[in-house]
């Protein structure tokens, strides 16, 4: 046992007991930088993490050390102070709770709009728990995050490990006195920092000093009083932000107007007299990242790119596939009867793609034909007008290899528009995990997967069959429902592509869909996809681990819930059948009053409102049976 390290750990413990958390962690971080695999340091970090409420981080450290070693060490008589911290109540800190909360939609949109502005080696000042860092990591070469709060640093380090990112580095640091040479970073970002400090001037000065010539500084602050927070010590407007920046540089300020209204976001491209860059290796100044499992690059990915009259965007889509950091891939482009310059563009890539040309028949037919040539273990169907981020395949294949039972992985995405060579990012579609037993139930409510982000194990398609060529739209919605029925799915809350918002034509040559009737056409085929689920046994949709045949109330509610979504999709016959089934089960049970759940009562209320406007009298009579049951029970 290294007595010197143990002495250092005891010293950090005393600071922790005195609630000097920065000093306590600083000592451990310094030692961790010297000996990244030292088990005693990890034991102390596990105890500190548990005490500050970060149990997941604590559990991770314990798993690295081994529970027996961990338990034996903290129960040694000489470590009674360490054990007493572990057994005492969690330390309450509002900021630490804030780090762990899920980001709301507006915050995610701000993060999604900010991240694409970053490039090269990025220093994020005030990285907090790493939410923005992870988004930046998908766009930049490396992300280096600093914060004055060590608990935030620990959360950030753990977050990038769970997402499978290998280009993020963190450490304690003060943005007003940066320990880096001049001209070190390609991008310096001050996001949600300046409103917390009495004097923002040193932060701007330091950012300018360490940013390279031709580099970029990105600044984001709350707008006026739009975000009330007792930790905000300064209020910003466009005018005083501009005045602050202009007092240090004459570089043009570029305002990002797409950011949600609670924030001000801008950047400057830095011009300096010297372009001499620092030659210091930055990684050595930061904590060693948690080790990731090695990726097995022997597993091939088949990328199928169906395309139809999208010559204006096709090259960007193809280049983004070619540039993937995961190299074991094949790109199969299926030209579905394009009449524009598609073939001319694809001729430049013949040596990099498998090219298939066919008569126009729709996206599903193009995918099915591409599938016949696919040889990969994983299948990725990509759209011809979107842009994949370089690390997309790498992060998703890593997750597949860590989770052998998962058949489908989808991710978040960032919306963008391009006009006259100018890019505008407008927000995020955020992927969220759904428990496997509820995946099909949730999917009936609407598509939960952002299709260009989805990668699927080949065996899923071997089980569920081909894409439905009768569906001109919503064919992806149908396929993901079929896969949900048989396989586990996973969401990776990380943007892996940019989704292009545009007014181009969709559909086929026979059924061309213009932007002004896109929603109507999509709903037409969406309805057909939902209709197909009516043939699935109710037990498969509403639960996979409860025998609902033994629970009358749950079975009745399940049929009524499916009836509700059939009604919402104007599938009146299917709605009527499910309501009738629910009524028959109720009457045959000989239970006078069913003990409906709150969810069940809400479903009945919605069904009564919807069905009462329909001409289907049988449905009206049957749903009123349940409404009257509730009324009679309430009146007794």
Image (cartoon, rainbow, N blue to C red):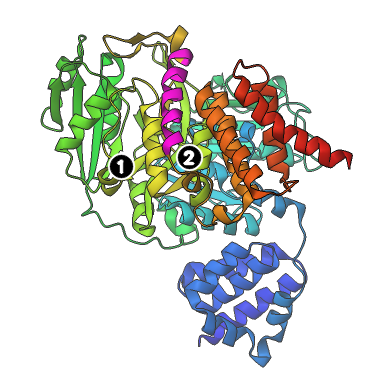
* Residue 534 falls inside the magenta stretch: yes
Q: Which residues are magenta?
A: 519-535
First in residue order: circle 1 vs circle 2: 2
Q: Is residue 626 left or right of residue 250?
A: right
Helix, strand or loop at label 2? It is: helix
Query: Which quadrant would the C terminus be assigned to in this image?
Result: top right
Spatial distance from mark 1 to mark 2, Cα to Cα? Answer: 36 Å
- Considering depth in this image, is 132 or 150 the residue closer to the camera? 132
* Residue 389 falls inside the magenta stretch: no
Q: Is residue 564 left or right of residue 382?
A: right
Between circles 1 and 2, the one closer to the viewer is: 1
Residue ID at (50%, 35%)? 444
Task: Determine crowd level at label 2: few under 14, some 14-19, many 20+ residues with C-alpha closer than 10 A.
Answer: many
- Considering depth in this image, is 584 or 110 the residue closer to the camera? 584
- Residue 42 rendering spot, x and y as whole percentages: 54, 73
- As drawn, which residue projects farthest toward the bottom? 77
Q: Is residue 568 left or right of residue 233?
A: left
Q: Quadrant of residue 313?
A: top left
Residue 335 appears in the picture as rendered: yes
- Residue 522 rendering spot, x and y as whole percentages: 44, 19
- Provide the residue designation for mark 2: 136
Residue ID at (50%, 78%)? 39
- Residue 293 rendering spot, x and y as whole percentages: 36, 62
- Considering depth in this image, is 550 or 255 the residue closer to the camera? 550
Helix, strand or loop at label 1? It is: helix
Residue ID at (46%, 23%)? 527
Residue 260 appears in the picture as rendered: no
- Provide the residue designation for mark 1: 464
- Considering depth in this image, is 326 or 421 the residue closer to the camera? 326
């Amino acid at each position: 046992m290294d007595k010197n390290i143990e002495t250092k750990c005891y010293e950090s413990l005393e600071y922790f007991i005195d609630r000097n958390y920065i000093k306590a962690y600083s000592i451990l971080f310094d030692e961790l930088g010297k000996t990244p695999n030292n088990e005693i340091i990890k034991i102390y970090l596990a105890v500190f993490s548990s005490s500050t409420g970060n149990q997941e981080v604590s559990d991770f450290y314990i798993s690295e050390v081994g529970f027996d070693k961990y338990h034996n060490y903290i129960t040694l008589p000489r470590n009674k102070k360490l054990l007493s911290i572990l057994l005492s109540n969690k330390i309450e800190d509002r900021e630490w709770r804030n780090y762990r909360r899920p980001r709301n939609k507006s915050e995610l949109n701000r993060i999604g709009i900010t991240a694409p502005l970053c490039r090269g080696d990025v220093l994020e000042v005030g990285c907090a728990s790493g939410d923005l860092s992870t988004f930046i990591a998908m766009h930049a070469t490396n992300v280096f995050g600093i914060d004055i709060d060590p608990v935030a640093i620990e959360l950030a380090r753990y977050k990038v490990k769970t997402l499978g990112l290998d280009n993020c580095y963190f450490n304690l640091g003060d943005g007003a006195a940066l320990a880096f040479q001049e001209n070190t970073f390609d991008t310096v970002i001050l996001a949600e920092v300046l409103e917390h400090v009495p004097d923002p001037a040193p932060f701007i000065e330091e950012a300018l000093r360490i940013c390279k010539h031709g580099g970029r500084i990105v600044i984001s602050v709350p707008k006026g009083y739009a975000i009330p927070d007792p930790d905000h010590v300064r209020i910003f407007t466009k005018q005083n932000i501009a005045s602050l920046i202009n007092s240090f540089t004459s570089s043009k300020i570029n305002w990002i107007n797409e950011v949600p209204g609670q924030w001000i976001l801008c950047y400057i491209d830095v011009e300096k007299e010297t372009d001499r860059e620092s030659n210091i290796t930055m990684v050595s100044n930061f904590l060693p990242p948690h080790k990731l499992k090695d990726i097995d690059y022997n597993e091939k990915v088949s990328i199928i790119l169906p395309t139809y009259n999208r010559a204006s965007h096709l090259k960007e889509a193809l280049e983004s596939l070619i540039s993937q950091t995961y190299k074991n891939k094949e790109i199969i482009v299926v030209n579905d009867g394009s009449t524009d310059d598609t073939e001319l563009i694809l001729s430049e890539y013949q040596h990099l793609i498998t090219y298939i040309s066919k008569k126009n028949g729709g996206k599903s037919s193009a995918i099915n034909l591409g599938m016949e040539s696919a040889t990969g273990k994983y299948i990725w169907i990509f759209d011809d007008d979107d842009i994949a981020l370089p690390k997309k395949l790498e992060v998703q294949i890593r997750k597949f290899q860590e989770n052998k039972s998962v058949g489908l992985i989808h991710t978040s995405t960032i919306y963008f528009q391009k006009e006259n060579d100018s890019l505008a990012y407008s927000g995020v579609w955020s992927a969220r995990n759904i428990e496997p037993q509820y995946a099909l139930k949730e999917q009936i409510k609407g598509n939960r997967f952002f299709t260009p982000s989805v990668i699927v194990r080949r065996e899923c398609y071997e089980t569920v069959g081909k894409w439905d060529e009768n569906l001109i739209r919503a064919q992806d919605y149908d396929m993901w429902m079929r896969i949900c029925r048989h396989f586990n799915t996973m969401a990776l809350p990380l943007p892996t592509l940019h989704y292009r918002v545009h007014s181009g034509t969709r559909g086929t040559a026979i059924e061309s869909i213009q932007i002004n009737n896109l929603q109507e056409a999509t709903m037409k085929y969406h309805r057909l996809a939902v209709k197909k689920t009516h043939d699935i046994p109710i037990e498969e949709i509403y639960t996979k681990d409860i025998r609902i045949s033994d629970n009358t109330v749950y079975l009745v509610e399940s049929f009524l819930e499916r009836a509700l979504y059939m009604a919402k999709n104007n599938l009146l016959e299917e709605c009527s059948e499910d309501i009738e089934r629910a009524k028959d089960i109720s009457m045959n049970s000989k239970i006078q009053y069913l003990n409906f759940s709150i969810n069940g009562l809400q479903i009945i209320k919605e069904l009564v409102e919807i069905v009462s406007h329909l001409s289907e009298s049988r449905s009206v009579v049957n749903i009123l049976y349940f409404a009257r049951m509730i009324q009679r029970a309430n009146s007794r």
